[in-house]
């Protein structure tokens, strides 16, 4: 992954993927700016428009004109959340990266506490978990099934792999395989490379604007198939320890 020339100047880069979130962008951007300005000397926020068909792009254009800390890239057509995240990662310039969703349900105020765990060396990837989920019953059951099946086949890493509130060293994702659905398995993929994980309870808010893109058909069954693929990858991963090497 290419690094920006400003990698040593920035404290943190925030990546936010969005798809048809025109109703949430400006209010979420204000929250992000407020938290970042208060907690960090140097920061940036990279928005990734995943082929939106509403006014998302127009609002991102307005946002970056008003605040240069915010930047965006926009896909020609919808490519999925994993592609959006990876594209966002590739545009970041800080040694530590944070992610949240663009629907307003993740709270930017949780980022500093997770950042401190990573910056202090306590963890390479600090993951949030939604202790009090503000979702409907269908989403809660689907998440429970997905997390349980993932832990059964790939080993337990974090209790809530579906929580997008996350902070990590950029090395954690530089060597991960790129595939559709990758975003659901970032903690497992980081752990497979030997990186340290931690978990912290984070705020989860109800969606108050816009429409959810979630359904059983487009999330649960696809993620279960992805878990089988990850199970194969974990079983076939290379594991070795160098005993000694020549000078």
Image (cartoon, rainbow, N blue to C red):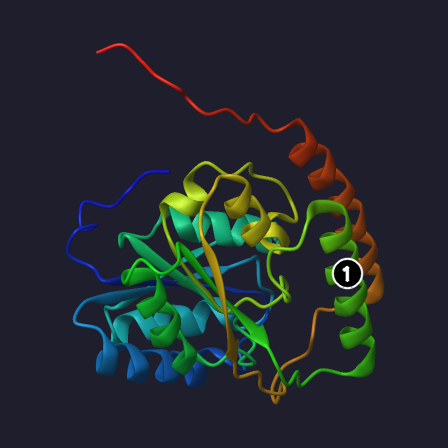
Residue bearing the label numbered 1: 148
Q: Is residue 240 left or right of residue 43?
A: right
Quadrant of the rendered structure where residue 61 is? bottom left
Residue at far top of view? 246
Q: Nearer the viewer, residue 243 or 38?
A: 243
The spot of residue 127 in percent (x, y) is 50, 65
The spot of residue 139 in percent (x, y) is 77, 74
Q: Is residue 48 left or right of residue 132?
A: left
State the quadrant of the N terminus. Answer: top left
Residue at far front of view? 243
Seen at 51% across and 79% down, the residue is 202
- Helix, strand or loop at disc 1? helix
Q: Nearer the viewer, residue 187 or 176?
A: 187
Q: Residues within 10 Å of mark 1 (few under 14, many from 20)?
A: some
Q: Is residue 225 left or right of residue 160?
A: right
Seen at 58% across and 86% down, the residue is 205
The spot of residue 40 in percent (x, y) is 22, 73
Tell me, yes or no, if residue 76 can be seen here: no
Residue 183 higher or lower than 34, as above or below: above
The spot of residue 49 in percent (x, y) is 50, 61
State the quadrant of the C terminus. Answer: top left
Quadrant of the rendered structure where residue 125 is? bottom left
């Amino acid at each position: 992954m290419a690094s920006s020339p400003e990698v040593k100047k920035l404290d943190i880069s925030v990546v936010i993927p969005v798809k048809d979130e025109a109703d949430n962008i400006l209010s979420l951007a204000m929250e992000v700016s407020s938290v970042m300005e208060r907690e960090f000397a140097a920061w940036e926020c990279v928005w990734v428009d995943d082929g939106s068909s509403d006014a998302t792009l127009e609002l991102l254009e307005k946002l970056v004109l008003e605040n240069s800390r915010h930047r965006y890239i926009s896909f020609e057509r919808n490519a999925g959340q994993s592609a959006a995240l990876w594209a966002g990662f590739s545009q970041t310039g800080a040694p530590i990266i944070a992610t949240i969703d663009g629907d307003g349900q993740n709270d930017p105020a949780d980022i500093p506490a997770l950042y401190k765990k990573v910056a202090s060396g306590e963890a390479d990837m600090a993951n949030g978990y939604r202790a009090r989920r503000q979702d409907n019953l269908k989403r809660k059951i689907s998440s429970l099934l997905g997390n349980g099946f993932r832990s059964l086949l790939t080993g337990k890493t974090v209790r809530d792999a579906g929580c997008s509130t996350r902070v990590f060293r950029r090395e954690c994702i530089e060597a991960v395989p790129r595939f559709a659905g990758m975003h659901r398995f970032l903690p497992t993929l980081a752990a497979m490379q030997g990186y340290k994980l931690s978990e912290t309870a984070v705020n989860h808010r109800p969606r108050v604007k816009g429409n959810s893109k979630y359904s059983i058909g487009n999330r649960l069954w696809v993620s279960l198939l992805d878990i089988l693929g990850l199970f194969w990858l974990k079983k076939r991963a290379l594991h070795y320890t160098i005993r000694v090497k020549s000078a």
